[in-house]
Amino acid sequence: MKYQSAVPSSRVSVRNNFRREPEAFRNTELKTSNFKPGRFCLSALLMAVFLAGLVGCGGKKKAQGGGFRAVAVERGDLQITVLATGNVQPNNQLSIKPSISGRIEKILIKEGDYVKKGQVLVELSSTERATLLDAARSQGPDALAHWEQLYQATPLLSPLSGQIIYLPTVNGQVVSQSDTIMVMSDHLIVNTQVDETDLAQIKQGQEATITLDAYPDETVDGKVRRISYQSTLVNNVTTYEVDVWPDKIPPFMRSGMTANVVFNVSEKDNILLVPSEAVQQSPDGQSYALKAPAGGKDKPQTVTIQTGLTDGKQTEVVSGLGEGDKVLIKSFSASQVAPTSTGSNPFMPNMRKSGGSSGGHGGH
């Protein structure tokens, strides 16, 4: 404690002035009444760093062409899309069960077949017929043929047109009325989850392109057939089910496959395009761009433009620029070379401001 009280007050003042140097440095009036050798040396050092930063900044801007690069306005095609993932599933899935308990005598279809409504799928024998035929079979082929002709099998008909997607039974298998003989679907679809922020861009009948993870090189065209009215929360994101019907179901498409769907929102061909970063917005909402001088000697010109479609990377130019015109795009942020709004410079040392006055005491 005795040692601290013996320290001259001038040393404490120099310590606090070092913390508040940025504010003192911005004061253009030199107060000779507060002049101290230590403070003068520090100010001179900061002035040297500041000037070196300005020189280096100017050299860098000149080397990089003032921090801008020129990009030509070109013609091209632009397509706006929405991406979604989903799964292949039947639109209507039907489990087929026998109308009677008994034995399967003959299965007339195989898994993957497309059948029509009313087509015979399976021939069944009731429990009584199966018992009678077994007894006739033991008496010889003539007796068996007689009773088969006299006592016809019960046919199982397809209730709708569609595809057999599951067939777990075999000939001769005994089944009851509660057993599922086969499963069929009327049409395979792709059920997707679309984010609520993209739902406004999805319409009934909208064209879409389907790609299966199992066959990434194959694409299937389809159309939107259903947009759910009920939302679903997936990973804390509100989504809506959108069903896409393939125009033609390829042989390799299977129920349960993972699919990626691209919804075609809008598309334009042979239009003027510029990088989206070249388009700026004025406070009144007007779009403009910085046009490069044609001869390379004149100053860049700010031109008002009218924009159209954009995918975030490229933007359509409706008017204001022509094909072959060059626009300037910043190659780095202006904050890297310009002082901030408070007057500080990025090349200056980052010093914390003290809460007291220049003559205050430092922290304990």
Image: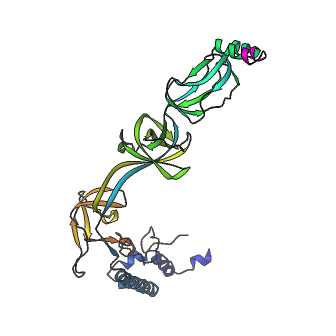
> What is the x, y in percent for residue 216?
52, 53
15 lies left or right of 310: right
Asked if the magenta segment contains residue 350, the reply would be: no
Highlighted magenta segment, given as a residue range: 136-143
Residue 214: tell me if it is visible: yes
Which residue is found at the position 70% from the left and 12% from the top?
128
- Residue 340, by quadrant, is bottom left
Question: Is the C terminus in the top left, top right, bottom left or bottom right quadrant?
Answer: bottom right
Question: Is the N terminus in the top left, top right, bottom left or bottom right quadrant?
Answer: bottom right
Question: Residue lying furthest front in this view?
Answer: 142
> What is the x, y in percent for residue 219?
46, 50
Question: Residue lying furthest right in this view?
Answer: 138
Which one is nearer the viewer's eye here, 117 or 48? 117
- Residue 285, by quadrant, is bottom left
- Residue 293, by quadrant, is bottom left
248 lies left or right of 31: right
Asked if the magenta segment contains residue 139, the reply would be: yes
Residue 35: tell me if it is visible: no
The chief SS type of the magenta part is helix
Q: Is residue 360 above or below residue 211?
A: below
Which residue is found at the position 67% from the left and 16% from the top?
148
Which one is nearer the viewer's eye here, 111 or 47? 111
Q: Is residue 113 above or below residue 3?
A: above
